Image (cartoon, helix red, strand yellow):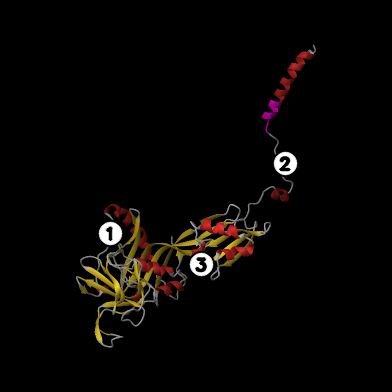
Amino acid sequence: MQSVPRRRLRLILPLLLLSGLSVFALLPPDPAPPPTSEAEADSAVTPLPVLDEYGFAADAFRTVEARIRRNETFADLLVPHEVPYPTIVRAAEKARPVFDVRRHLRAGRPYRLYLDDSLGTARYLVYAQDAVNYVVFDLSDSVRVYARQRPVETVERTASGVITRSLYETLDEQGIDPALAIELSEIYAWQIDFYRIQKHDAFTVIYEERRIDGEPVGLGRIRAARFTHAGRDYLAFRFEQDGQADYFDEEGNSLRKAFLMSPVKYARISSRYNLRRFHPVQKRYKAHLGTDYAAPAGTPIRATGDGVVVEARYAKYNGNYVKIRHNGTYTTGYLHMSRIAKGIRPGVRVRQGDVIGYVGSTGLATGPHVCYRFWKNGRQVNHLREEFPSSEPVQARHRTAFETLRNTLLPRLEQAPLHYADAAPATAPAP
């Protein structure tokens, strides 16, 4: 065979080398050799850091947990952990739009410090406002402050019971958050006088429970309820229309009435409307044309309906009092206040539920209470015997959606077994 000239070989050789490289480049790479042992396999995977409930790597810091003590300041929390005072001042200033440390630190609330031992100082401070909300103070050179929330799971539950002593105690005995009693009293504020609940009254309620890491942290919305009082059933269904949620009965009528049953949330009736009552101060029989609600001094007093303040002053017998005209028919009065709320004066328009004053014992009174007076067409009457019209019902265009909701929840209210105080807890997830 004739040999290739040296000059041509020099030209062809680079082309051959390039072709060879291209071929090898197209070949699949050799598979990596498998680990020779389980230990090597484990070491090949970098473990993810374990994060605590506030999102910090648990092993990256040394933590100190404590609770705010009475009169303790923001600086008191940080100075013992070598945080420079200028950094503390900057953190307090940056926190102001999010959390004012001078006003909102509460004695008894927990906090946690994350200490960087390599720097010998606190790196982060987390202040728990409640079970869900917390504030993070990043004490690094940039100094940042931000608010966060822990992830909350919502679980629907059904509870029921027969009242033997009080609604609060009945719920507590079953392991149900007693705050549910307050929520129910708000829903039925226009239908039921919760100061007159009777033995053997009963309730069934479908509600939401909020949880963090499986532990209850509070109540969500009440979806539906049935309250049996004095032999009569009162139904309530939460329904939203045009972006506004409210409670309606089974016919779609609003539970919200023109007037609240009581001007004080947490009180008891100490004296009723009576045309011949023995007066405890004047020691003689005279008409008592109002209803007295006894409550601790300082308890907020609410306007029972929308209206305009016509009087807000002190009088010898009434003490500090407020009088509200609601329309051409109804007027209400609130007597013996310890003080009238700021901004409440003649001519001011108030809404139902607005705080207009605080329980006291000014004027002709023997103890802290509010005497609630009610005028109809200029004549004082017993408001507990009056029937008031409801607010707007479910609108016609939302009627089908409301009936679908009602028809879904009503059987669950009717079929839930009633539990007595000595029965097992009645809180099971609804189907």
Residue 197 visible, this orientation: no
Q: Quadrant of residue 238?
A: bottom left
Q: Main secondary structure of the magenta part?
A: helix
Q: Residue furthest bottom?
A: 283
Taking the spot 29% from the left edge, 55% from the top edge, the residue there is: 399
Q: Between marks 2 and 3, how big is the CA–CA gap?
A: 60 Å
Q: Between marks 1 and 2, how big is the CA–CA gap?
A: 74 Å
Which residue in the protein does label 3 denote? 106
Which residue in the protein does label 1 denote? 393
x, y (%) of residue 56? 60, 56
- Which is more toward the observer, 396 or 31? 396
Q: Is residue 392 magenta?
A: no
Q: Residue furthest top?
A: 2
Q: Quadrant of residue 286?
A: bottom left
Sequence-wise first label, 2 or 3:
2
**Kind of residue at disc 1:** Pro
**Kind of residue at disc 3:** Arg
Residue 205 visible, this orientation: yes
Helix, strand or loop at disc 3? loop
Q: Quadrant of the C terminus?
A: bottom left
x, y (%) of residue 169? 43, 75
Say few, some or many: other residues with alpha carbon within 10 Å of mark 3 (under 14 / 14 to 19 / 20 or more): some
Helix, strand or loop at disc 2? loop
Which residue in the protein does label 2 denote? 33
Extent of the magenta region: 21-28
x, y (%) of residue 383? 26, 73
Instruction: Answer left or right for 218 relative to 120.
Output: left
